[in-house]
C-alpha cells in the first residue's frame, strides 16, 4: 500500500486565476517528482478539468496536492473538494458526452483516462470530492483486472 | 454626570481617548502635517495636509468611542477610507515597499501619544495605561488600513496589466496573400479565446483570408474547454469562408487529447506552423519549389 508523504499544498479554487495557479503548481510538482513530459501534461490537463468542475459546478472549493510513495515509485495525489450541489447520477456524469452545462461533456470521463487512479465521492446537497493519483512511472504492482 | 452611558462611560479609556482626540484635533493635525506621510503626499499646500489630518483624527475619535479600535472595517473609518487609499497609493507609486509605507504611518503615532500623556497628568495610572494602549491599537489599525489600501492599488495594477495582456497577446499575422496566422500563447481561458476569435474574424475579413492558421505551440495545456474554444473559433471562421488549420500540436498534447477523448476530427491539424503554411499554399494553388542543382525540379 502506498503511503502519503504529507500534504504539500492546499490551493483555493475560487476564480479563473486560481485555475492558472493550480495548473502551474501541478506541473511544477509533477516535474519535481520526475514525471515524464507526457505524464506531466496528462496530469496537468486532468487537474485543469477537475479544478474547472470544482469552480463551475461546485461553486468553488480547494485542491490538495500530496506527494505519495509506493515502494520506490513516487506519485502525486490531487484531491479536489467542493461543497456544491453534488452529482445525483455519478454513472451518467462519468459517461462521455454527458454535460449539465454547455461544455463538451468530456471532462470527468476523460479525466479518468488521463490518470492512474481515480476516485469520486459525491452526494446531492453535500458536495463532491475527486481524488486522482498518478505515478512518475507505473507502480511496481501489476494492475488488477476487474 | 455621564450622558452617554451606553457608549463609553466617563472615565473609560474609550471615552478618554475619544475626548482627547476631539480636544486636540487641531494640534494633532498640525503635527501630522509635518510628518513624512502627509508632507510627501500633500505637496501643494500645508493647509491641505492639515485638513486631511483633521479628517483622519475625526475618524479615529469616532472609532475610539464606538469600541471597535482594532477593526479596520469599523464604521468610523469609512469616511477617510478613500483618502487613506489615495495617500497609500501615492506613496506606493513612488516605489516604496509596503514596510516603508508602514513605517511612514507608524511615525504618526509618537506625536499623538506624547500629546495624550501630556494631556492627562492627573489621571490614575490604570486609566493612563489603558488609554495609551487603546490609542496604540487605534494607530495600529490605521496602519493596517493604509497598507490594505496600498495593496489594493497593487491588485488594481495587476488587473490592468491582465487586460493589457489580453490585447497584446493575440496578434494576427499575414503570412501570404489569403493566409493569416494567430500564434496563441499561454492559457486560453474564456476571455482570451473571445478576443482571439474576434481579432481572427476581423483579420479574415480585412485580409480577405481563405486560410487561417491557429498555432498552439505556446499553449501549455489543451483541456476540453480549450478544445471547445478552438472548435468554436474554427466553426466561426468557416462561416466567414475561411478554412482553419490548427498547428503546433506537440506529442504530449496529442496523446493527452486522445486520452481525454476529444474529437478534433473536423479540424485540419498539422504538427508545425510550416506544415500548416505549406498545406494552405498548396490548397491555394501555389507550392514552394526548391531549385535543385540542375535548376529545375520540384519537391
Image (cartoon, rainbow, N blue to C red):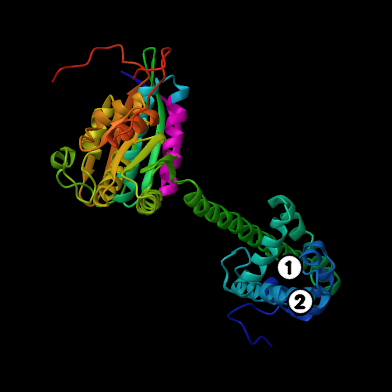
- The alpha-carbon separation of the residues under discs 2 and 1 comes to 10 Å
The image shows residue A73, relative to residue A18, as above or below, that is above
* Quadrant housing residue B141: bottom right
Is disc 1 placed on a helix, strand or loop? Answer: helix
Instruction: Mark 1: give few (<14), some (14-19) or many (20+) Cα within 10 Å.
Output: many
The image shows residue A8, relative to residue B294, as above or below, that is below
Quadrant (top left, top right, bottom left, bottom right) of the N terminus of chain A: top left
Is disc 2 placed on a helix, strand or loop? Answer: helix
Compared across the picture, whether B231 is left or right of A90 comes to right
The image shows residue B252, relative to residue A91, as above or below, that is above
Q: x, y (%) of residue B280?
A: 32, 35
Q: Are marks 2 and 1 in contact (CB under 8 Å)?
A: yes
The residue nearer to you, when weighing B290 against B257, is B290
* Quadrant housing residue A93: top left
Q: x, y (%) of residue A6?
A: 44, 28
First in sequence, mark 2 or 1: give its number.
2
- Say which residue label 1 marks: B131
Instruction: Mark 2: give few (<14), some (14-19) or many (20+) Cα within 10 Å.
Output: some
Q: Which disc number belongs to residue B20?
A: 2
Output the chain of dot 2.
B
Compared across the picture, whether A5 is left or right of B127 comes to left
Quadrant (top left, top right, bottom left, bottom right) of the C terminus of chain A: top left
Residue that appears at 15% across and 38% down = A95
Compared across the picture, whether B84 is left or right of A107 comes to right
Residue that appears at 68% across and 72% down = B60
Residue range in magenta is A4-30
Amino acid at each position: 500500500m502506498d503511503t502519503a508523504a504529507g500534504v504539500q499544498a492546499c490551493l483555493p479554487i475560487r476564480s479563473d486565476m486560481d485555475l492558472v495557479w493550480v495548473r502551474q503548481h501541478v506541473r511544477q510538482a509533477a516535474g519535481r517528482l520526475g514525471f515524464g513530459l507526457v505524464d506531466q501534461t496528462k496530469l496537468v490537463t486532468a487537474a485543469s478539468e477537475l479544478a474547472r468542475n470544482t469552480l463551475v459546478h461546485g461553486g468553488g472549493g480547494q485542491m490538495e496536492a500530496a506527494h505519495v510513495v509506493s515502494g520506490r515509485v513516487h506519485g502525486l495525489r490531487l484531491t479536489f473538494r467542493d461543497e456544491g450541489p453534488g452529482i445525483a447520477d455519478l454513472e451518467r456524469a462519468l459517461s462521455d458526452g454527458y454535460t449539465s452545462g454547455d461544455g463538451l461533456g468530456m471532462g470527468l470521463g476523460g479525466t479518468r483516462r488521463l490518470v492512474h487512479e481515480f476516485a469520486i465521492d459525491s452526494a446531492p446537497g453535500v458536495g463532491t470530492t475527486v481524488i486522482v493519483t498518478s505515478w512518475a512511472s507505473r507502480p511496481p504492482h501489476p494492475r488488477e483486472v476487474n | 454626570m455621564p450622558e452617554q452611558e451606553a457608549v463609553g462611560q466617563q472615565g473609560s479609556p474609550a471615552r478618554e481617548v475619544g475626548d482627547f482626540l476631539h480636544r486636540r484635533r487641531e494640534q494633532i493635525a498640525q503635527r501630522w502635517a509635518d510628518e513624512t506621510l502627509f508632507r510627501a503626499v500633500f505637496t501643494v499646500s500645508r493647509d491641505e495636509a492639515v485638513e486631511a489630518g483633521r479628517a483622519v483624527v475625526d475618524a479615529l475619535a469616532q472609532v475610539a468611542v464606538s469600541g471597535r479600535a482594532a477593526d479596520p472595517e469599523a464604521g468610523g473609518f469609512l469616511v477617510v477610507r478613500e483618502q487613506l487609499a489615495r495617500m497609500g497609493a501615492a506613496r506606493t507609486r513612488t516605489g516604496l515597499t509596503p514596510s516603508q509605507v508602514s513605517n511612514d504611518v507608524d511615525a504618526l503615532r509618537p506625536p499623538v501619544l506624547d500629546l495624550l500623556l501630556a494631556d492627562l497628568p492627573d489621571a490614575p495610572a490604570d486609566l493612563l495605561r489603558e488609554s495609551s494602549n487603546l490609542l496604540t491599537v487605534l494607530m495600529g489599525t490605521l496602519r493596517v488600513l493604509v497598507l490594505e489600501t496600498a495593496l489594493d492599488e497593487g491588485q488594481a495594477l495587476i488587473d490592468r496589466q491582465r487586460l493589457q495582456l489580453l490585447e497584446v497577446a493575440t496578434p494576427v499575422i499575414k503570412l501570404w496573400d489569403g493566409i493569416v496566422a494567430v500564434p496563441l500563447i499561454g492559457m486560453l481561458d474564456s476571455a482570451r479565446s473571445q478576443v482571439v476569435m474576434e481579432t481572427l474574424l476581423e483579420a479574415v475579413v480585412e485580409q480577405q483570408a481563405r486560410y487561417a492558421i491557429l498555432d498552439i505551440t505556446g499553449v501549455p495545456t489543451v483541456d476540453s474547454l480549450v478544445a471547445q474554444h478552438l472548435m468554436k473559433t474554427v466553426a466561426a471562421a468557416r462561416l466567414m469562408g475561411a478554412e482553419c488549420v490548427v498547428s503546433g500540436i506537440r506529442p504530449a498534447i496529442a496523446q493527452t487529447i486522445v486520452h481525454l477523448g476529444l474529437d478534433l476530427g473536423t479540424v485540419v491539424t498539422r504538427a508545425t506552423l510550416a506544415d500548416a503554411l505549406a498545406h494552405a499554399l498548396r490548397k491555394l494553388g501555389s507550392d514552394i519549389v526548391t531549385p535543385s542543382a540542375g535548376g529545375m525540379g520540384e519537391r
